[in-house]
Image (spheres, helix red, strand yellow):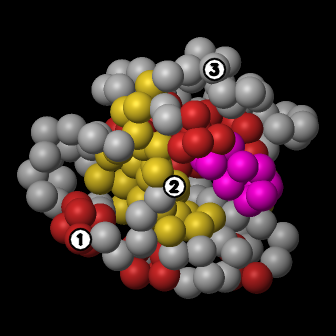
Amino acid sequence: MLKIAPAGAGPLIGFATLNINPSMMLQYAQAAIDKGVDYGFGSKDPNLGKWPIDYSAIDCSGFVRAILAYSTLGQTQRYDMPDGSFLEADWFKAQGFKATMYAMTVNVDGHVRVGIHRPGGRGGDSVGHIWLVYRGQSIESYGGNGPGRRAWDHQWFLDHVDECYVLC
């Protein structure tokens, strides 16, 4: 579950935000990378972001959900985020997060953003994808790799991104 609160200052006033701890987010991602977690379509974290990581495969939506749960630990009044990239995309929109142009993910401004590719969207794939971007690098689990990081402007992202929201 994630705590959602309206932003208190800056360009996110009036939009929903998550109180993400970026250090914890990066720690979780690196632990999954170091452990050699594989990509597994439909695979989820059975303990939703609990430490230490105890799964061997995870898909993109499961990874985003787990990493956000881990990096917002200790908060009260948390909200359920659905599973599945399409449902997560709808959830971010419905909660009132600020939509932004994907090109803004190049910014090293401390904001965490989420990129979304919808099934049948740009690129025409039948399967969606969801990933986080922080300081110009993705944080994601993707086919053929598992958890990893790529440059924000990797050609796949540029060809497939349908939506982007600022999370914090």
Q: Earlier in the sequence, mark 1 or mark 3?
A: 3
Q: Secondary structure at mark 1?
A: helix
The residue at the point 58 percent across, 42 percent down is 34
Per the image, the residue denoted by label 1 is 155
Indicate the quadrant containing the N terminus: top left, top right, bottom left or bottom right.
top right
Q: Which residue is mark 3?
A: 54
Residue 10: x percent and y percent?
76, 82
Determine contact: label 2, label 1, CB under 8 Å: no
The quadrant in which residue 41 appears is top left
Q: Residue at x 40, y 39 (%)?
A: 146
The residue lying toward the viewer, choosing from 35 and 142, is 35
On whether residue 150 falls in the magenta region, the answer is: no
Would you call the spot at circle 1 few (<14 residues within 10 Å), some (14-19), or many (20 or more)?
Answer: few
Residue nearest the observer in this picture, 74 or 87:
74
Q: Is residue 22 magenta?
A: yes
Q: Secondary structure at mark 2?
A: strand
Instruction: Estimate the spatial distance between the alpha carbons at disc 2 and disc 3, rounded to whole Å.
Output: 19 Å
Q: Earlier in the sequence, mark 2 or mark 1?
A: 2
Q: Residue under circle 2? A: 139
Q: Secondary structure at mark 3?
A: loop
Q: Quadrant of the C terminus?
A: bottom right
